[in-house]
Image: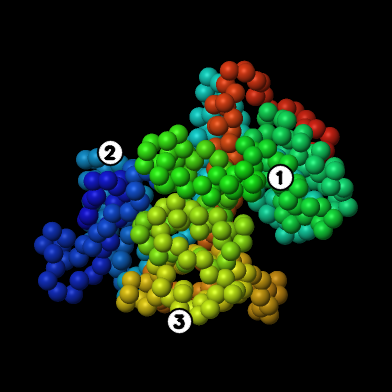
Amino acid sequence: MCVSPTNHRILILLSKKKKNPSPCCGGLQCRGRSTLSSNVVGHAPSLSIACYSSSSSSSMLQLLFLLAAHHFLVSGFPISSTTAPPSSSGLAAVMDGKRVAAEIRSELRDQVSQMTTAPTTIIPGLAVILVGDRRDSQTYVNMKKKACAEIGIVSYGYDFASDVSQEEILRCVEECNANPRIHGILVQLPLPPHIAEEVILQTIDPEKDVDGLHPVNVAQLCSTHTHEQQQGCWNNWNWNNLSNVPFPIPCTPQGCIELLDRYGVDIEGKHAVVLGRSNLVGVPVALLLMHRHATVTVAHSRTTNIDEVVRRADILICAVGQPGLVRKEWLKPHDGGGAVVIDVGINAVDDDTNPKGYRLVGDVDYEECQHVASLITPVPGGVGPMTIAMLMRNTVNACRRSNNSSSSSHESTTVPTQNKKKANNEDK
């Protein structure tokens, strides 16, 4: 067991040892490493236990619980568990986005509960604007509304036919901007061809831009202020705690960084390769990695010898929309430590064995790369759930900032019984 004085979460890794057993562990070898720095948002100090054993045994379980109980009694830290794969399998540990997203929603639910029971009650509100009847967009919107209901965020649904005019969408956005009960505005993309997405997104109040796509918020993300931070200027933002950065950060890139943090991946000083240069993922996640002091390479369709570039990565974030692009030969050899692989891609490929006729895969060949990587996200169940969790966090943070800036105005925060006429539904 290894405890770092600067870290709060301790990870105990246990594995079978064939000879020379450690007398303190009753025949089990302890290999410990501390994880997750104390400034990671939303983390109470905790003990995290990962069992690296080829088979379960009562003696091992007893040892785990004794260690955990002793640590809890001595330090008062809550205990959490992390499951890692058997060390003998040679497979990468899976970064379970569904589980981490559920933890984050639980944390946000507690925060919202405190906000709604405080002397100055404020209830977070999220407006979701949906244009057209695309099935995938409807599915995403329903998932976001479900997450709102779980956490305690009031969702306002504004649904429009696909032939709606751009002017009517702009009027809807402006009404949401002016509504003090709405703290976040989400326009579900893509929009029909006759509507200019950039015009719509730039109309959203930057404070309510929970997708983090407004030019003002993008500009703030691009500002490193390295020298100013050393001099203690006003914008000395803590990039290790994204909840305290005073503007919304794009959800998917934020979710990638959150996964790295919650799995104890040290970003500082590492070589991170980002595959893809889109405004939605590639560029903002590269900026976030730089803010965390990684050395970042952005590779794309015009990069020469791209496999050699990727092979140098300690951390690989892939978002290009090409199923199975990254093969195991592209990754750092396992004996070199193995790369941490975050697969943002989600692609539908034909599959006659699936009742739907297709299955979802990422940009990384998971079956191959799990034998080479050290950590890897699955598709689905990796980055996708994290994106929605970060949207919820951006909404709660926007609500908190709004309350802090307008606390003197004493605006009513009572949830209305009926929304404006454009709103088709309201999820409470």
Front position among marks 2 and 3: 3
Q: Are marks 3 and 1 in contact (CB under 8 Å)?
A: no
* Foreground residue among 306 and 89: 306
Give, as a three-letter code, the residue at label 3: Glu
Q: Secondary structure at mark 1?
A: helix
Q: Are marks 2 and 3 in contact (CB under 8 Å)?
A: no
Residue behind mark 2: 76
Q: Earlier in the sequence, mark 1 or mark 2?
A: 2
Provide residue 68's location: percent of width, then percent of height. Answer: 27, 49
Q: Secondary structure at mark 3?
A: helix
Is 354 located above or below residue 80 in the figure?
below
Residue behind mark 1: 202
Left or right, 10 with reference to 363: left
Provide residue 3's location: percent of width, then percent of height. Answer: 23, 51
Q: Earlier in the sequence, mark 2 or mark 3?
A: 2
Q: Secondary structure at mark 2?
A: loop
Which numbered marker is on residue 329?
3
Residue in the image at 50% along x and 58% along y: 286
Q: Compute the Cα span from label 2 to label 3.
A: 46 Å
Q: Earlier in the sequence, mark 3 or mark 1?
A: 1
Residue in the image at 18% along x and 75% along y: 18
Residue in the image at 58% along x and 18% along y: 408
Which numbered marker is on residue 156?
none
Residue in the image at 29% along x and 51% along y: 10
Provide residue 339's location: percent of width, then percent of height. Answer: 40, 69
Is 151 located above or below residue 294 in the figure?
above
